[in-house]
Structures are given as structure tokens and as C-alpha cells.
Amino acid sequence: MIIDKLTKKYDGKEVVQGVSFEIPKGKVLSLIGPNGAGKSTVMGVISRLIARDGGEVEFEGADISKWKSKELAKRLAILTQSNNIQMKLTVEELVAFGRFPYCGGRLTPEDERIVDQAIRYMELDSFRDRFIDELSGGQRQRAYIAMVIAQDTEYVLLDEPTNNLDIYHATNMMKIVRRLCDELGKTVILVLHEINYAAFYSDYICAFKDGKIAKFGTVQEVMTKETLSRIYDVDFEIMEIEGKPLSIYY
């Protein structure tokens, strides 16, 4: 997927300004930056939830606007911050909802197998008959990830998957994100505020500031004290855990 000279305005203000980068396949890419930096808007444009004002998003050789919605849904799944489906669904019903683009609302035995596999993969087997609104925040996020897994797409877009989770559940969520790539071969694009999680669980980082890309590269290239301090004008301490950089900012 290639993003080229992307622009977007809200109320006359250009919130995304000529953004260009390429999403590496089979890797975890994190879009980081403060509120208002443009990262969630870019994610929304990539997923076609937000209309762009200029630029291109090339997906599998064609502009993403040319894809039919049903065909795009078979290749790209997105989990937004406002992912609460306003229906009284059990975990199993929610995960089955992820198969609807493929089965027309009528599950085949193969669809049922995929749904069951996704529930078990996310360790939700004992919760499959529980209603979503009865679950904890961490359990609910796992159920939505299971729905995404059931879609069986190559690309997975997650907007703030650690939002409103405590450090224990947020860390577990990021481990799940890493498994989506390493075990299931997904290309994962994240929007994250937490630079620490981005540093430890990503392969590539796209650092946004004021609607522009301040730095794009591997974790090792972006997550240096000099780079982060220059971009965000704060002090960072870089540590290594299990051979990976972990940025502590203050």
C-alpha cells in the first residue's frame, strides 16, 4: 500500500499536509504523534471512512477509491476507537458478524469453523455466550480483535487499540497485535499515543507532527533519543528490553 501526497482539510485548516509513505507488507507499522498530528485522519482515509481532499492511496495496483466495498472488506479490516456495535450481541454473534461480507448473513460450515477458530485464538471460548456489554474493557477489546481475525484479511488497521486499558491489558493487547503479524502473517497498521508500545512491538514507525511526517523508518531508525527529542521537543530516555528499544519520555 502506497500513500502519496495525501491532504485533508477540516473547516479550512489543512490537518494532513502532503503525507507520503509506503506500508511494508507483513510487518507492524505504528503511526505515532500527539493529538491533532493527523495520524487518525490518515488511518481514516486509508480505510475509506474519511474522504481525502488530495493525493492517492494505492492498494494492490489501483487507487483504493476504485475498489468495491465488498471486495475491499475481504482484504482490509479496521477497528476504530468507536467500535461499539449498538446491538445486544454475544461474543460468538459479534465474531460471526465479521464473516458477513463473505457469507451474506448466512454462515456456512466453513464460516462457523473460522469463527470458532478466532474465538479460541483470542482465548474467549468460556465467554462465547456472554454479551459484549457484560465484559471488561480488556475482554471486549479481545472480542473485537477476534471479529477482525474472523474477517481473515491480509491488512488489519487498529486505531488506538490500547485506549482506556490499564497497563496490564494494554500490554496484553500489544502482544496480540504482534501475534497477528508473526503468527497469522497480517500486515498491521496501528495508531498509537503510547510511544513506548510503538517502540517495543512495531517493526516500522511513522512519526507525525502538525499534519506532516516528521520521520518514517524502522524502529531502530526512529526510536533514538536524538530523533524523538528533535521531533517532539521533550526529553527521552532509550532503554533496551530483549534487544528492542523502549523509549521513556518525560
Image (spheres, rainbow, N blue to C red):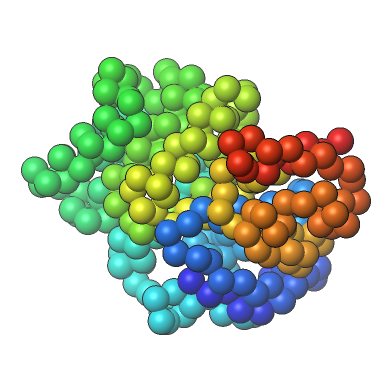
- Spot occupied by residue 133 in the image (x, y as percentages of width and height): 44, 23
Q: Residue at x 74, y 64 (%)?
A: 215
Q: Residue at x 45, y 28 (%)?
A: 140
144 on left or right of 248 = left
For the C terminus, the image quarter is top right
- Spot occupied by residue 141 in the image (x, y as percentages of width and height): 47, 32
Quadrant of res 210:
bottom right
Note whether residue 140 is visible: yes
128 on left or right of 56 = left
**Residue extending furthest front?**
243
242 on left or right of 27 = right
Q: Residue at x 40, y 47 (%)?
A: 182
- Spot occupied by residue 142 in the image (x, y as percentages of width and height): 42, 32
Note whether residue 9 is visible: no
- Total marks shown come to 0
Quadrant of res 238:
top right
Vertical side of 123 occupied by 215: above or below? below
Task: Name the one closer to the observer, 242 or 18.
Answer: 242
- Spot occupied by residue 244 in the image (x, y as percentages of width and height): 62, 43
**Residue extending furthest left?**
109
Vertical side of 126 occupied by 222: above or below? below
Quadrant of res 97:
top left
Q: Residue at x 45, y 37 (%)?
A: 176
Vertical side of 209 occupied by 176: above or below? above
168 on left or right of 176 = right
